[in-house]
Amino acid sequence: MDKLILGQYVPGDSYIHRLDPRTKLVASMWFIILIFMASSWWTYLVLLGLVFVAAKISEIPISYYINGLKPLALLILITVFFQLIFAQGDTVLLEYGWLTITLEGIINAILIILRFVMIVMMSTILTLTTTPLEIADGIESLLRPLKRLKVPVQEIALILSIALRFVPTLMQETEKIMNAQKARGVSFDEGNLLERMKKIVPLLIPLFISSIDRADQLAVAMTARGYRGGDHRTKLRQLEWTNQDFYTFGLFGMVTVLLLSARFII
Amino acid sequence: MEIRFEDVNFTYQPGTPFENKVLHDINFTIKDGSYTAIVGHTGSGKSTILQHLNALKTPTSGSVWLGDLEVTSNKTEKSIRDIRKEIGVVFQFPEAQLFEETVGKDIAFGPQNFGVSEEEALKRAEEILPVVGLDASFMDRSPFELSGGQMRRVAIAGVLVMEPSVLVLDEPTAGLDPKGQLEMMSLFNGLHKEKNLTIVLVTHQMEDVANYADHMIVLDDGKIVGDGSPRTVFQKEKWLRSIQLDVPNTVEFAKELIKDPSWSYDKLPLTLDELTQMIIKEIDHPEVERKDKQVRTDG
Amino acid sequence: MSLISLQNVSYRYSSTDDFLALNNISLTIEKGEWITLIGANGSGKSTLVKTLNGLNMPQEGTISVDGLAMNEENIWTIRQKVGMVFQNPDNQFVGSTVADDVAFGLENIGIPRDEMIDRINRSLEQVGMEDFKQAEPARLSGGQKQRVAIAGILALEPEIIILDEATSMLDPKGRAEVLETVKAVKEKSNLTVLSITHDINEAAHADRIFVLEKGQIKYIDVPEEIFKLGDELIDLGLTVPFVEQLKYQLMENGLDLPEEFMTEERLVEWLWKYDSKM
């Protein structure tokens, strides 16, 4: 439970930690596009190199990244399995009844694993080096152009930051109510799926009721402090681009040009 | 039921960067039929001890004896679950645990988890209501339309209905007005006196300790720093203040009075009655007092 | 002119409701006063203070705050002058960090960022929380959160702070620390304080105590007089002060104590003197 309270974020002061959250958000998305632009072995090598350099300078132990991959291992395995079985190809390596495994299938499977690993690692770098709050700030700033389309960006950002702020409070509340119901004889980790789901009711209803109560009180407190939404609000939190951010975008630009030219020239 | 802590240590998230040792070599005994108060400022380890009292947490090392059951780090949830029927815990703001459509069903929830039939559990629920000062008409009402004080009584009934032999109370009067506090504390005192219920009270209210408890455990920084009768512990008034704890008004007043060398007491007055008796005795029989002055018991 | 004045204020929760939560209340509060509001649960204390910043709009009567009549037009100016600290420390902490939370009120009224930073620093210093600027609420004690709430109010340079049972969920240490803070900032900024409480020690700080019963003002008096009410105090949501309890018991036992309200020190001295005369 405490792990969840702290989120993924690992405090630090590395180059990556200091990057503007917008840079990290854009770079992560940019990287995903780059992966789908990769066409040959050496382009994969370049991208893989980029991931490992980024992971290295994040100054976060590699074990955190491996932990990030673990939950996805099953998904990766299933995809690989289907690739192996259903991929079409000319170089048949093994044929047994309906099962055909081709060299192309194996290569595709390896490339898929690589893509998965790179995407997961890049987004893990983002969440390990950026607090949820910074991510929320970054998203708000990136969404700002949508204001012209009457999207209530400020309100969305406020909702997001309040939601994040109440995560630890709700976790504490959950633990408290769980303890109280355990003391009344509930054992949350016994029984089959249906029985367990039934046991969640005495946990969920109190949580739901207290959350509504909280929301109510919070709304009153916010009104009392003069909140009425709208555009006249100023902001304490401001994001500032630094040279680091320009260097990072420069690097990504160069890699993009490299991959594009590889596609067209070679 | 007797509860005994033997060299209990507890560490949160051992072996991680967030490792945090919150209990250090805890030893104490809560005797069957006693009224024990556990005091200490916020963060002293009180709530961790409380969670050991009905095995919601198991010690990292050492053992907690709950009657004949020894709880150690390697006990499984299943083997300790039944003890929770014997040791009822009323958590802070217990009204937060209510969830059923009716008061009756909510109170009947606990016994059913321990294998009592629904019919029997509802019958017991109806019987327990008067004990917490509510009548049978509450059975079919929604707990969420009640006042805060009534909700708390329902939650307490939901614990008492399991007929525990030990009742653990975590700040049971928090957030109530003084009248509600008084009623709540006399409710528990009644249960202690009439049903011989063992009571463990975790509190900041030193007046309650002075008025009701016969045993007092003082915690500071995860260690036991005081263990004895309230009268002996409250003697050390300055020391209690140094670990951010209060002393009852009565003790403070008596300590103030004896600053005049002609005043004294032979036992530290804890309740208002005791303090009154001390003053009356001093004023009425000055010649008797003068003899007593030789055996002054000043902490 | 009084800082706050209520004239014949009545309030019902909905227009179809016959029950008057506030029934024809008239009172005034002067600048710089400390007022404690007491009353049993359901007597209308919270309802009353919520009319002072327009969270409740009374159906009858007039309210004025710092010369401004309470109406839709003035409501946002009034909210800036009337700061409110609520009971649950968690459910009023809006920001993700201490600095963010103090900033919230300033952001609402559009204070420029540079001035905002200045005001945040100053008000956090006033409540002694300047070292926790970047701390998250989950890492703070209840008392610390309430002090941050007070800083959030001070940053808006208000006229009056209202404490709506702001100490009732705190431990004794938190309670003392919030009370000390309120006392200090009141002195420094010449604030007016209105506190709803069940805590006799908090009530004792007041210049005057307002007693509410069933939506009506029952008494308005100095603490010394109110504390003499004895057992009636319990029904009004307070405890009988310890000294009064002791005096009552001593008188029952035949001691001839003076009528007037005594502090603990006074009673000790009185007893010493009485004893030496015997």
Image: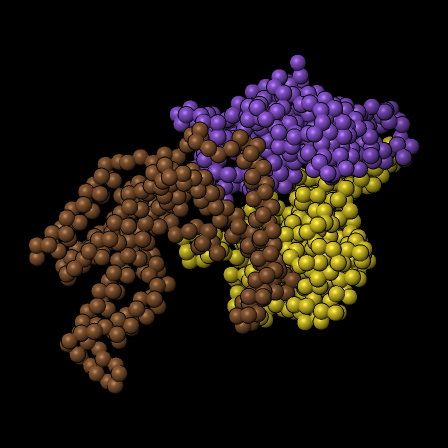
Whether residue C32 is visible: no
Q: Residue at x 71, y 50 (%)?
A: B145
Compared to residue B106, the image places residue C11 above or below, namely: above
Q: Residue furthest top?
A: C1
Q: Position of residue A224 (x, y in %)?
A: 57, 32
Q: Position of residue C164 (x, y in %)?
A: 64, 34
Q: Which tint was used for chain C?
A: purple
Q: Which tint was used for chain B?
A: yellow
Q: Is B48 or A245 nearer to us in this picture?
A: A245
Q: Is A145 or A42 nearer to us in this picture?
A: A145
Q: Residue at x 63, y 24 (%)?
A: C70
Whether residue B43 is visible: yes
Q: Position of residue A43 (x, y in %)?
A: 15, 57
Q: Is A134 on the left or on the right of B203, as rendered?
A: left
Q: Residue at x 77, y 55 (%)?
A: B138
Q: Is A245 on the left or on the right of C85, as rendered?
A: left
Q: Is A261 or A25 nearer to us in this picture?
A: A261
Q: Residue at x 51, y 33 (%)?
A: A228
Determine which quarter of the picture holds residue A150.
top left
In the picture, one chain is brown; tell me its letter.
A
Compared to residue B252, the image places residue B159 above or below, namely: below
Determine which quarter of the picture holds residue B72.
bottom right
Q: Is A182 on the left or on the right of B20, as rendered?
A: right
Q: Is C197 or B203 nearer to us in this picture?
A: C197
Quadrant holding the C terminus of chain A: bottom left
Q: How many circles with numbers are drawn on the protein?
A: 0
